[in-house]
């Protein structure tokens, strides 16, 4: 389907965007398949294909393609950037699952469980290297700077999370620093790089960067909230995993801010000391509801989505801009 065709307005926003960009994304997928190949190390495409083929929505590379097209780009190098973005994302997932000792992602066993930690780390490194090859294909130094900086910021966010995750003194400010690093940095780089490649005016480049950042933050806040509200079938992971892994995400940070002495003692035992017993998750849920932490987290996600939509108003009106506007709603749709 081309952008001149009328999309199916009964479909989900993400699906409408995917339909509108179908030819571009087919080219991106072909490039991903080509560049993840390795003649000398067959385990690389095996591990990569396990994760890339696990049914992910390709949201980040789609944002790169959408931003470029929205800004009038008519070439094909946005496919290289989109593939690079997907490789960066996949590499971070491989590394994250090793760090978190995860056993499930997108409803399937993780690569580190099926193979081993060494394979996951090394294949992740390979994909980072491939992503930089794809970036340099554009011969655009500013684009290379944007995506390489995002790669560094993502790692900074992950390292910051290591020290903040189990610290009961972690503030919302620190939480958002982590989220801006580990999640939002790639969203904003994806949209900004697409606009830069298209030669868009600076105000449009800035607007698309801000849209991507806001969308990424909303995306992560929703993910952290649904860890307590969803189910394994929907999320692809077990409910309460963040609690069991002692992660100080926004719901817990908000609950801690309102904790009385008894509640503080509970969080100290379960999160700070890691002494978790039968029934603790259920009690944690009671505290999260009683303090209003879940509802406040929901409101925060909706606010970030609204910020993203507001920044899109800088861009010329078009069907594609409306799709990105609707996409911000899609990210938080399960909370409405």
Image: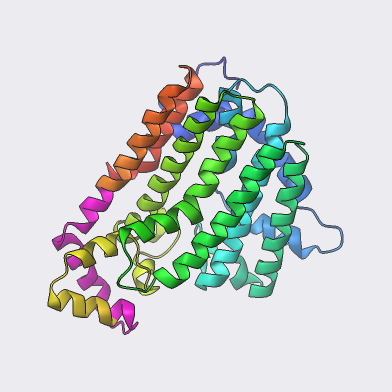
User: Looking at the image, which residue is at 55% across and 56% down?
Assistant: 154
Q: Would residue 58 be seen by someone viewing this image from the given angle?
A: no
User: Looking at the image, which residue is at 27% across and 52% down?
Assistant: 297
Depth check, front residue: 152 or 72: 152
User: Looking at the image, which residue is at 15% across and 61% down?
Assistant: 291
Q: Position of residue 271 (x, y in %)?
A: 32, 76
User: Looking at the image, which residue is at 38% across and 45% down?
Assistant: 218
From the viewer's perspective, tell me whether residue 104 is left or right of residue 173.
Answer: right
Q: Would residue 210 be seen by someone viewing this image from the given angle?
A: yes
Residue 40, placed above or below residue 187:
below
Q: Position of residue 41 (x, y in %)?
A: 82, 64
Does the magenta portion include 274? yes
Does the magenta portion include 291? yes
From the viewer's perspective, tell me whether residue 147 is left or right of residue 225.
Answer: right
Span highlighted in magenta in the image: 270-298
Q: Quadrant of the C terminus?
A: top left
């Amino acid at each position: 389907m081309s952008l001149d065709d009328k999309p199916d307005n009964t479909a989900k926003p993400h699906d409408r965007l995917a339909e509108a960009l179908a030819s571009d994304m087919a080219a991106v997928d072909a490039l991903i398949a080509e560049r993840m190949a390795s003649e000398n190390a067959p385990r690389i495409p095996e591990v990569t294909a396990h994760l890339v083929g696990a049914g992910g929505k390709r949201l980040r590379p789609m944002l790169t393609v959408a931003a470029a097209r929205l800004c009038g780009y008519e070439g094909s190098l946005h496919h290289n950037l989109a593939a690079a973005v997907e490789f960066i994302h996949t590499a971070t997932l491989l590394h994250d699952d090793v760090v978190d000792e995860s056993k499930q992602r997108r409803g399937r066993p993780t690569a580190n469980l099926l193979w081993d930690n060494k394979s996951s780390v090394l294949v992740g490194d390979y994909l980072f290297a491939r992503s930089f090859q794809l970036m340099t294909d554009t011969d655009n130094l500013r684009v290379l700077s944007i995506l390489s900086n995002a790669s560094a910021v993502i790692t900074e966010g992950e390292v910051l999370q290591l020290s903040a995750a189990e610290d009961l003194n972690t503030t919302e400010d620190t939480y958002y620093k982590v989220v801006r690093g580990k999640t939002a940095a790639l969203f904003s780089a994806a949209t900004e790089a697409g606009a830069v490649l298209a030669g868009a005016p600076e105000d449009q480049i800035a607007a698309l960067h801000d849209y991507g950042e806001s969308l990424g933050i909303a995306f992560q806040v929703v993910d952290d909230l649904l860890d307590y509200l969803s189910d394994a079938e929907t999320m692809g992971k077990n409910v309460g995993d963040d609690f069991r892994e002692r992660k100080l995400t926004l719901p817990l940070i908000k609950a801690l801010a309102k904790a009385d002495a008894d509640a503080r003692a509970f969080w100290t035992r379960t999160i700070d000391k890691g002494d978790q017993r039968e029934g603790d998750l259920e009690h944690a849920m009671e505290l999260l509801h009683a303090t209003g932490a879940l509802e406040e987290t929901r409101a925060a996600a909706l606010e970030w989505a609204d910020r993203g939509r507001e920044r899109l108003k800088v861009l010329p009106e078009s069907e594609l801009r409306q799709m990105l506007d609707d996409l911000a709603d899609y990210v938080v749709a399960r909370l409405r």
